[in-house]
Amino acid sequence: MTDVSALLETIEAAVPAGVAFLDGELRFVRGGAGFAAVAGRSAADLAGLTVPEALPALSDRLEPVLREVTRTRTPVVGMRFETGESAAPDHARIWRVDCRPLPGDGPAGLCLVLTDVTAHTFATAFRTAFMQDMPEGLYTVDAEGGITSLNRAASEMLGWSQEELLGRPAHATVHLPGSDGTPVPDADCPLRRPAASIDEVFVRKDRSTFQVVCSVAPLRVGSDTAGRVVTFRDVTETRRADLAAHHDQKLESLGRLSAGLAHEINTPIQFVGDNTRFLADAYEDMWQLLMVYRECMAVELGEVSWDERTARAREAEAKADLEYLVAEIPAAVKQTLEGVERVASLVRAMKSFSYKDTAEQSYADINEAIRTTLTVARNEVKYVADVELDLDELPEVLCHRGDLNQVFLNLLVNAADAMEGRPDRGRITISSRLDGPDVVIRFTDDGSGIPEHIRQSIFDPFFTTKGVGKGTGQGLALARAVLDRHGGSIDVQSVPGEGTTFTLRLPADGRQDS
């Protein structure tokens, strides 16, 4: 049955996990390429090895599990453990263990599947931390206004637990009065419409009120709007004017990015989960098919004709839908790997984007900061424009990287907003060049442009051309302040109806803070 062996090798190579078979004495009979990679040796070298010999780093935890499965003939599914805890964090790995006894009346044997779930676990932890550890309150509502989730800060500020609020109408529960205390009908609730920054009054569970600044963003599923994300913070006690502008602008960015980040992380995690469940079911079908092949090869069936054995094998292949599995398993594996890489890249981008500046400047890769910002803001841009990067090789720049990340985000979001209302997709070009001692960065869009009579006012605090509730007028004012702080400059060239270019100039060697 050479074809069976070849088929198993194909499946073992396709499954994004380590798959191996062990005999009743817990010696390896065969292992796929994925399992060989985990063991750090070739598949051929695995044959005959014990668990401690093949997997010395895992054997202390793994071998007792395998012996228990051998003894009880009870499968172990989804067990997880971590290795390398005492080493550097980058070397710690989290493993999922699935182990099943092989069916049949012959010698006991096991099928072992080891899956590295480090990236998936880290992505899930990141999503939880993002929701639960952010200081601003955040809740999501469905299209009808019912609360679907909230984070810890929202629960603490509102005085409700998540279980108490889920399913309740958000407006009637936490936002009944207007900012002046007058009740507002649900249909006129300002939180039903996307807005960058709104002053409102929220109601706690004990019916006491507090003043908040809110940001509302659509929660998109593909091109459809399935609900809204509302972020807010309590400004009852503290509202110093010089800090409010800076915080409001950050809240605007957070509100606009929250829905996109949730969608960008959730989508690949969903199809990774779906594909993993499909691969688990597919492998179960292949086990059953393998057992039929083994029965057809059994010595005790010597009196059974070859035609009857072939008929049994073909019947088992039809039951397993072998052709479908062979066609779909590689596609499922490819999608799974793409999903894991997408989550990992987004996690890396968020970690880089949320870099916390210290009082002192540090050297940073400006091109990488631009790419990171584009990854984080992808959901803001992808529906309205194509982005082209034209980045030259640059030296590292002495700067406050976190502040520059915010500037790049503001310019990118402004360019995307300039595309709204047009029938076709726009184009945004981001370029970087070294010009003598300076680094020059340009954000160019082919949007609506800026009329000449307001061009000199766009960097003024609180000046905005966006609709009421859409913009705070702080983005460009913050950008000029950041560039001034770096000893650089920001200029704008625009032609109404043709587009706009913002040019940023930074001294590569930085400027000492005063």
Image (spheres, rainbow, N blue to C red):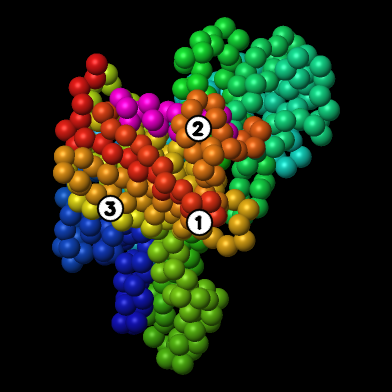
Query: Residue 67: where, in percent of width, then height?
Result: 33, 46
In magenta segment, residue 473: yes
Nearer mark to the viewer, of 3 and 1: 1
Specify whether residue 174 is in view.
Answer: yes
Number of disc labels: 3
Q: Which residue is mark 3?
A: 391
Q: Earlier in the sequence, mark 2 or mark 3?
A: 3
Considering the numbered disc 1 on the image, is that residue within a helix, a strand or a loop? loop
Q: Which residue is mark 2?
A: 457
| Three-letter amino acid code of the residue under disc 2 | Ser
Of residues 236 and 497, the one nearer the viewer is: 497
Query: Residue 122: where, in percent of width, then height?
Result: 38, 39
Of residues 33 and 128, the one nearer the viewer is: 128
Considering the numbered disc 2 on the image, is that residue within a helix, a strand or a loop? helix
| Left or right position of 170 against 510 | right
Q: Which residues are magenta?
A: 471-485
Q: Quadrant of the N terminus?
A: bottom left
Which is the main secondary structure of the residues drawn in magenta? helix
Q: Which residue is mark 1?
A: 498
Residue 291's disc is none
Q: CA distance from mark 2 to mark 1?
A: 20 Å
Q: CA distance from mark 3 to mark 1?
A: 23 Å
Compared to residue 6, the image places residue 343 above or below, namely: above
